[in-house]
């Protein structure tokens, strides 16, 4: 039995790593619509594993009870095989996840094989009973694993149910009212782009995506899109009505070394210049280019109100955004209507908000620096609705600030999050620590911008989430 206990603990450790590192942190599985069935399988498997961990930690399953345990193990094996098939249908697994799954399968085979050969025959020969045993520390460790995998199963079950309900809600899709469009998209697998593509597909539009990994893109969208990896792969005879250019490496990430700045510039401006190269040779020119940008265009300017007429600053973020927009504006020479979307901090399921809320869930939330820096934000649902309006309304042209009417200080954000989560908010992260760790990028967290969505308001746009409380309540209620 000692070998079985060793293998069970190893299975629990690897399973915890796979769930936390891959499903939660790397892939963010609970937020992906295509993972609804996979999450349901995980929920059932985790529940069975919880019974197996706890059952083998404290009991010998003698006589007829052995058949019940054997049935649970057999069902778990079948569900694992189904899970492998579902994963391959819906996503391209990272290499580390494939390796982890292989080791888990090998260890599981050794575990259940050894149990079937050395322990099960002995239990089968005894009278029917659940015989209580105590393996000391091993029993308590396995009980902890049983609790963890059980909670993980509950979380996956609720996530699957929520994704199922979201898939049924079509009336909120802003792209349903548009005529059928042929749309070329860059950045279609990111936090905004992924949701954009899902809603466009649900509304029946035709999509073609520039992607570093076309195979993974096709798997993610179940072969409902056409993906290509180089502008040279796109024929001059291709016809599109709309281009949506959202490509770009994440700004919040590694420190902004000279090399990192080059990556950020090339991922945006280089992609846009490649797009312009294709436009030069395209026989049919699209009608509109909707181009991403950010409120970083204005630089960090504290509490100064900034509408679309505000100037740039001598800062890297300002340079990055202004050069990206300048490249996009060159498409006007081909007769395209160019819409430049200057995005604030985008809230929604996934993205930055769950990471910002995590310290508050743990009771460790509070201010960053003095908390006076202004946070200009927008909900992803509003971003998608504005993109839909920009496609359909020919009056949309030029730059638009995509930020909610209610910008708040970081201290106000902390107070609101803590109040809605019923948690304290007294921790403070010193600005010097953030700036030391993040370098120049630290200004994103310690300095602020009060951005005004003047042109959207003038156009009569009505925000779905105009204030912070409504956006955070939607997030918290959704369980993200």
Image (cartoon, helix red, strand yellow):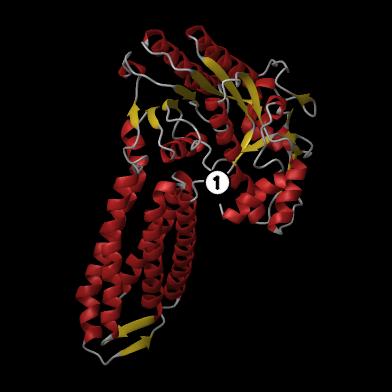
Toward which corner of the image does residue 457 lie, by quadrant?
top right
Within-10-Å neighbours for mark 1: few <14, some 14–19, many 20+: many
Position of 73 relative to 417 (above/below):
below
Horizontal placement of 4 versus 121: left or right?
A: right
Residue at (58% x, 32% y) in the render: 252
Q: Position of residue 263 (x, y in %)?
A: 49, 22
Q: Position of residue 91 (x, y in %)?
A: 35, 43
**Res 251 seen here:** no
Q: Quadrant of the N terminus?
A: bottom left
Q: Name the residue carrying label 1.
A: 349
Toward which corner of the image does residue 117 lie, by quadrant?
bottom left
**Res 435 seen here:** yes
Residue at (39% x, 73% y) in the render: 51
Horizontal placement of 306 versus 348: left or right?
A: right
Q: Position of residue 23 (x, y in %)?
A: 43, 50
Horizontal placement of 50 versus 255: left or right?
A: left
């Amino acid at each position: 039995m000692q070998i079985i206990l060793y293998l069970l603990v190893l299975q629990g450790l690897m399973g915890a790593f796979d769930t936390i590192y891959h499903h939660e942190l790397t892939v963010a599985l609970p937020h992906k619509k295509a993972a609804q069935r996979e999450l349901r399988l995980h929920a059932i498997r985790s529940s069975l594993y919880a019974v197996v961990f706890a059952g083998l930690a404290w009991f010998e399953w003698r006589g007829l009870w052995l058949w019940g345990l054997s049935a649970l193990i057999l069902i778990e094996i079948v569900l694992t095989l189904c899970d492998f098939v579902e994963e391959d249908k819906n996503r391209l697994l990272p290499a580390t996840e494939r390796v982890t799954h292989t080791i888990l399968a090998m260890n599981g085979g050794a575990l259940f094989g050894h149990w079937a050969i050395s322990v099960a025959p002995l239990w089968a020969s005894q009278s029917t009973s659940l015989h209580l045993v105590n393996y000391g520390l091993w029993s308590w460790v396995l009980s902890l694993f049983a609790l963890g995998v059980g909670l993980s199963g509950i979380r996956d079950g609720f996530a699957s149910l929520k994704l199922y309900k979201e898939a049924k809600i079509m009336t909120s899709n802003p792209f349903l009212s548009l005529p059928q469009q042929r749309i070329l998209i860059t950045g279609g697998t990111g936090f905004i782009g992924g949701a954009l593509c899902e809603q466009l597909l649900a509304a029946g539009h035709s999509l073609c995506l520039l992607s570093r990994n076309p195979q993974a893109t096709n798997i993610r969208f179940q072969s409902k899109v056409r993906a290509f990896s180089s502008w040279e792969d796109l024929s001059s005879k291709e016809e599109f009505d709309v281009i949506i250019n959202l490509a770009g490496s994440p700004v919040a990430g590694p420190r902004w070394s000279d090399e990192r700045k080059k990556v950020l510039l090339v991922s945006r401006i280089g992609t846009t210049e490649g797009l312009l190269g294709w436009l030069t040779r395209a026989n049919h020119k699209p009608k509109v280019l909707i181009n991403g940008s950010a409120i970083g265009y204005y630089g960090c300017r504290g509490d100064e109100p900034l509408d679309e007429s505000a100037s740039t600053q001598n800062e890297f973020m300002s340079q990055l955004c202004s050069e990206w927009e300048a490249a996009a504006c060159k498409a006007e020479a081909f007769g395209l209507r160019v819409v430049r979307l200057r995005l604030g901090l985008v809230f929604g399921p996934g993205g930055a908000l769950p990471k910002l809320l995590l310290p508050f869930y743990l009771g460790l939330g509070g201010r960053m620096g003095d908390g006076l820096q202004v946070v200009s934000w927008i909900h992803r649902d509003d971003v998608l609705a504005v993109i839909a309006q920009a496609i359909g309304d020919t009056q949309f042209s030029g730059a638009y600030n995509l930020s909610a009417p209610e910008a708040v200080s970081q201290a106000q954000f902390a107070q609101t999050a803590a109040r809605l989560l019923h948690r304290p908010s007294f921790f403070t992260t010193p600005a010097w620590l953030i700036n030391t760790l993040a370098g120049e990028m630290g200004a994103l967290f310690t300095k602020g911008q009060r951005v005004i969505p003047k042109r959207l308001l003038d156009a009569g746009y009505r925000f779905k989430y105009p204030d912070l409380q409504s956006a955070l309540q939607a997030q918290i209620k959704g369980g993200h």
